[in-house]
Amino acid sequence: DAGVIQSPRHEVTEMGQEVTLRCKPISGHDYLFWYRQTMMRGLELLIYFNNNVPIDDSGMPEDRFSAKMPNASFSTLKIQPSEPRDSAVYFCASSLSGYQPQHFGDGTRLSIL
Amino acid sequence: RKEVEQDPGPFNVPEGATVAFNCTYSNSASQSFFWYRQDCRKEPKLLMSVYSSGNEDGRFTAQLNRASQYISLLIRDSKLSDSATYLCVSPSTSGTYKYIFGTGTRLKVLA
């Protein structure tokens, strides 16, 4: 069975550039989560969707961050403009329902120079 | 106070030892908890779910203490391959279906 698929695996770009991270959840999973992980702050929830609808975006750090889920099999997290402090590993996860465990993708390792 | 707190470790134990980690949580209404394992530079992977009093899976046992609001993870007969960071997960106090991950406890099993 295919797990959560994220792309790209690595992204290195200069500050000010737009960054788009992509995620394909596990088929049939109704919940999709975006996380950011850093050494200092650990794993932080940025936003989550239920049936393609954003439910809680209180973790999105600022207006430079946006996320969309146009259909059940695709979501994007966009940073525009990017800054060096956005450097982190970004994970996408999905779950069958709200109380079921989440399954993570391999993550995108983002470096903003 | 953080919603989920874990001792960061590292816990250095010899092969074959028994080791236990605790995790405290804030949401007294929580019904479901999880333990995840994360290897260096990898994604978190589900280790165990804890829905009621506890759960056991081979060498791993998770227990829930609602009165004191903590969950524990016990690993028996530690293997070198158990070396990883163990993340505790609890529902947040601030949103439905919103889970908070602890910062993790690092385990090193030594030969």
Image (tube, rainbow, N blue to C red):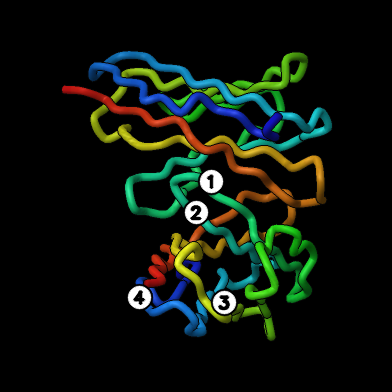
Give the number of marks: 4
Q: Residue at x 67, y 33 (%)?
A: B2
Q: Which of marks 1 and 3 precedes in the sequence? A: 1
CA–CA distance in space, label 4 to label 2: 16 Å
Q: Which of marks 3 and 2 precedes in the sequence? A: 2
Mark toward the viewer: 4 or 2: 4
* Marking on residue A12: 4
The amino acid sitting under disc 2 is Gln
CA–CA distance in space, label 3 to label 1: 19 Å
Q: Residue at x 59, y 73 (%)?
A: A27
CA–CA distance in space, label 1 to label 2: 7 Å
Q: Residues within 10 Å of mark 4 (few under 14, many from 20)?
A: few
Q: Which residue is mark 3?
A: A79
Q: Secondary structure at mark 2?
A: strand
Q: Which residue is mark 1?
A: A41
Q: Secondary structure at mark 3?
A: strand
Q: Residue at x 80, y 40 (%)?
A: B93
Q: Secondary structure at mark 4?
A: strand
Q: Which residue is mark 2?
A: A37
Mark toward the viewer: 1 or 2: 1
Q: Nearer the viewer, residue B50 or A55?
A: A55
- In this rendering, the answer to whether A35 lies above or below B110 is below
CA–CA distance in space, label 4 to label 1: 21 Å
The amino acid sitting under disc 3 is Ile
